[in-house]
Each structure stands twice: as C-alpha cells, then as structure tokens.
Image (tube, rainbow, N blue to C red):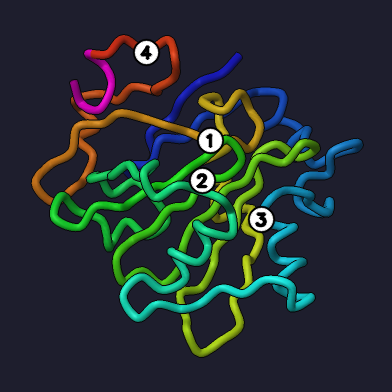
Amino acid sequence: MSRAVLVGGLLLTLTSPTFASGVDTFERDPVRYSTAEPDNVVSRLQNRLDAGKAKLDFDAETGFLKAALRELKVPVSSQMLVFSKTSLQRQRIAPRTPRAIYFNDDVYVGYCRQGDVMEVSAVDPKLGTVFYTLDQDGDSRPRFTRQTDNCTLCHHSSQTQGVPGHVVRSVFADAEGHPILSEGSYRVDQSTPLERRWGG
C-alpha cells in the first residue's frame, strides 16, 4: 500500500515494503544499482574520453553542450524547454531562463544557461535509468560523474514504479517559475489527455 506525504513543500511517496525494509529492492542482487558498473551511451563515451578516442570541446557560451550532444548523437532539434523550478539547478530556472532538455531514445541532456553542470540521464539495459552530471568547467577535463541520491530523491517514487526512472510532469508555475502545487500536477505519458499536458 502506498501513501503520499507532503513535508515542507516536498512531496514524498512512501511504499510500505521498501520503506519498512530500509533497503530499496534495486540495491540488492542481482541489480545492485548504486555499485554496479553501468554500460550505456554515457559510460561508453566516458571510456572513449579517458582513452583519448573522443574529445569534448568547450564553448564559451554553452560549455560542453554542443560537443556532448554531437558525441551522444542527440539532435539539437529535440530541444524542449522547461519553465518551472523542478530540477537540480532550480535556482537558475524561470520563465525568462528556461531549462533546455535534449533527447534521443538512449539519453536525456538537461542544460541551464550559465549552469554549473549539465544533467544527463541514460537508459542502461541492466540498471534502467542512470544519472550523471558533467561540470561546465573549461579548465578541467570533462568527466561524467555518476549520481545516485541527488537524482533519485525525485526520480525514484511511485511515479517511476519504485525504481530509478525518468519523470515527466506537467505543472502550473507562477511568474518566477515555482510550481503551484495547489493547482495539481499531471504525470505525462502516452496515455495523458492533451488538456492535461504542459499546463493545458
């Protein structure tokens, strides 16, 4: 049985078996989510970077974005804009400075203008969704750093069927980009009616 609890403005979903055991089932054999070695387009790109077989050029305006999209084979034309403060870099997101998301079938790239990091999530055949950040620092070698708790705080709930996964929600936002929770929100998938997508 699941129940949702609103704590200090953060919606938490508690699932009794997982919550009671204290260990998420995906952290046990055979998955061992946090400690298993990922094998996906991002981990393979990092291996090529480490071996000197790939390079990410740094752009003064967009950082590693253009190079990462090229290496991950993500089309620029896939861009979607998010105007609500609903991600790791929420302090940078507002209606005038939206977060851009680029995607293909294997990977999602989140970019905030003048952001500290790019947020990347990849589809992994064994682990499901694996999360990374890429520091937007032109003075250091580019490294996709795997993230677990930082991302699964939002990307592991009943909305993702109890395992780390992608979440698309439609929310109403105020003039500064804060979600208006009293207006409700809708999880978006192929079954969501159009009037409930993207704030109607």
Q: Is residue 132 left or right of residue 82?
A: right
Q: Measure the alpha-carbon separation of dots 3 and 2.
A: 10 Å
Q: Nearer the viewer, residue 163 or 3?
A: 163
Q: Quadrant of residue 113?
A: bottom left
For badge 3, the amino acid type reads Val
Dots 1, 4 in contact, CB < 8 A: no
- Mark 3 crowdedness (10 Å alpha carbons): few <14, some 14-19, many ≥20: many
Confirm whether the magenta stretch covers residue 28: no
Mark 4 or mark 2: which comes first in sequence?
2
Residue 23 place in picture, x, y as percent: 76, 39
For badge 1, the amino acid type reads His
Dots 2, 1 in contact, CB < 8 A: yes
Helix, strand, or loop for circle 2?
A: strand
Helix, strand, or loop for circle 3?
A: helix
Q: Nearer the viewer, residue 95 or 48?
A: 48
- Mark 2 crowdedness (10 Å alpha carbons): few <14, some 14-19, many ≥20: many
Q: Main secondary structure of the magenta part?
A: loop
Q: Which residue is mark 3?
A: 42
Q: Which residue is mark 2?
A: 108
In the image, which is nearer the foreground, mark 2 or mark 1?
2
- Mark 4 crowdedness (10 Å alpha carbons): few <14, some 14-19, many ≥20: few
Q: Quadrant of the N terminus?
A: top right
Q: Measure the alpha-carbon separation of dots 1 and 3.
A: 16 Å
Q: Which residue is mark 1?
A: 166
Q: Write the start and end of the magenta stretch as one range.
A: 195-200
Mark 1 or mark 3: which comes first in sequence?
3
Q: Measure the alpha-carbon separation of dots 1 and 4.
A: 16 Å
For badge 4, the amino acid type reads Thr
Up/down of 156 relative to 89, above or below: above
Q: Which residue is mark 4?
A: 192
Q: Quadrant of the C terminus?
A: top left
Q: Quadrant of residue 61?
A: bottom left
